[in-house]
């Protein structure tokens, strides 16, 4: 009897195991088939390469049929997207292919279209941050857009901000921006300065309020820039756009060239964007102006604009023109390099290039090629 029960148990166990195996095999087969079908679908309908389609389909794990992808693609076409735009969206966010069109995609897209986004602008915004379609319409998207309207003053600027930073619609609770807005106003920021700040550096408004408060106090206490200074909001933008560790490394580079703390502070108060340059750029410019040209910290502190000019498009091309004139011993205006660098491009050409077109026929063409965008 023991043997019989055991045999019966094993027989039953085998049938159970076999049934489980068959169910799992069917699941894997269905998933594999759907994935394979989606690959072919993306290749045939949107012009994906086999590799692109395989990569995209691998991120869509719950697809049961091609019905929903068809509905999504049709919706994108009805919205006005061309195949290239649809391909871009699907490449970056393939999971959109399994979103519900009527409940999820259509109302969110309509909200953005009502704002004024359409065509390639709308396609780019969705492609860059598809999480937008997963945010609640009434609990997040609309309140966030209304908040941006209050900060920026109108839909045109809201659109500009969203195009620049689509994550503004998904980053977190919109009341963070409201709180930071009030804080900046308390520190003397006018609505116009806040508007410009939000358009150029939207992350300034979306950081944690404690960090914003700390940065504002650092501007006053550590960098000794008064609230009513025209450079206060510029300095705040520079500080808010980088971590303290990176800022400290940049200050360390200046000090390695013989600058004192007061030199760095003096430069920052005159033109904070000097600290906004990358570490590589700061070192390149200090090497040129201090090691090669012999400028002292005191001069650069009092003339900080020279540090933010482009080496490739302004400083070096103009130095090469002056060098060409001097090598040929041609008479020219003996202005300081700083003065020459501050001239507008048209004024520079008028003073140092066009008068010498007969003596140096190719000077103009060489210079124009160098400074061309």
Image (cartoon, rainbow, N blue to C red):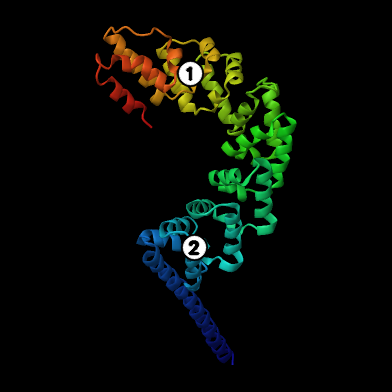
How many numbered tags mark residues here? 2
Q: Is residue 184 above or below residue 145?
A: above
Residue drawn at point x = 59 percent, y = 43 percent: 157
Q: Nearer the viewer, residue 120 or 180?
A: 120
Label 2 residue SS? helix
Reading the chain from its start, which is encountered first: label 1 or label 2? 2
Q: Locate residue 273: give its quadrant.
A: top right
Give percent across and percent down for residue 28. 47, 73
Give percent across and percent down for residue 246. 56, 30
| Residue 100 visible to an observer of this rendering | no
Give percent across and percent down for residue 145. 65, 50
Residue under label 2 = 76
The 10 Å Cα crowd at callout 2, few under 14, some 14 to 19, many 20 or more, is many
Residue under label 1 = 306
| Residue 186 visible to an observer of this rendering | yes
Give percent across and percent down for residue 258. 52, 13
Residue drawn at point x = 49 percent, y = 27 percent: 279
Q: Image quadrant for the C terminus? A: top left
Q: Locate residue 51: give its quadrant.
A: bottom left
Q: Image quadrant for the N terminus? A: bottom right
Q: Nearer the viewer, residue 308 or 223?
A: 308
């Amino acid at each position: 009897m023991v043997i019989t029960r055991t045999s019966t148990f094993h027989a039953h166990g085998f049938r159970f195991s076999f049934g489980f195996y068959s169910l799992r095999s069917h699941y894997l087969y269905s998933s594999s088939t759907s994935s394979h079908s989606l690959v072919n679908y993306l290749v045939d309908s949107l012009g994906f390469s086999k590799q692109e389609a395989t990569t995209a389909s691998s991120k869509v794990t719950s697809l049961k049929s091609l019905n929903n992808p068809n509905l999504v693609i049709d919706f994108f076409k009805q919205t006005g997207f061309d195949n290239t735009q649809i391909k871009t969206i699907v490449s970056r966010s393939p999971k959109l292919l399994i979103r519900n069109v009527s409940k999820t995609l259509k109302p969110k897209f309509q909200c953005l279209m009502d704002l004024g986004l359409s065509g390639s602008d709308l396609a780019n915004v969705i492609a860059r941050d598809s999480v937008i379609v997963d945010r609640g319409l009434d609990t997040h998207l609309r309140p966030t857009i209304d908040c941006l309207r209050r900060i920026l003053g109108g839909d045109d600027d809201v659109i500009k901000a969203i195009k620049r930073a689509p994550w503004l619609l998904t980053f977190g609770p919109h009341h963070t921006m409201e709180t930071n807005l009030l804080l900046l106003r308390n520190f003397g920021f006018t609505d116009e300065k806040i508007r410009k700040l939000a358009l150029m550096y939207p992350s300034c408004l979306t950081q944690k309020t404690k960090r914003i408060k700390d940065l504002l106090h650092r501007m006053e206490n550590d960098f000794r820039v008064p609230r009513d200074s025209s450079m206060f909001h510029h300095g705040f933008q520079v500080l808010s756009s980088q971590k303290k560790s990176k800022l400290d490394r940049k200050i360390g580079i200046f000090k390695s060239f013989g600058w004192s703390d007061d030199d760095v502070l003096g430069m920052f108060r005159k033109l904070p964007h000097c600290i906004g340059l990358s570490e590589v750029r700061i070192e390149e410019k200090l090497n040129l102006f201090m090691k090669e040209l012999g400028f002292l910290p005191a001069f650069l502190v009092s003339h900080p604009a020279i540090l933010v000019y482009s080496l490739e498009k302004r400083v070096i091309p103009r130095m090469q023109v002056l060098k060409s004139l001097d090598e040929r011993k041609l008479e020219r205006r003996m202005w300081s390099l700083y003065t020459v660098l501050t001239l507008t491009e048209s004024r520079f050409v008028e003073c140092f290039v066009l008068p010498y077109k007969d003596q140096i026929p190719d000077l103009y063409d060489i210079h124009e090629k160098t400074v061309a965008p």
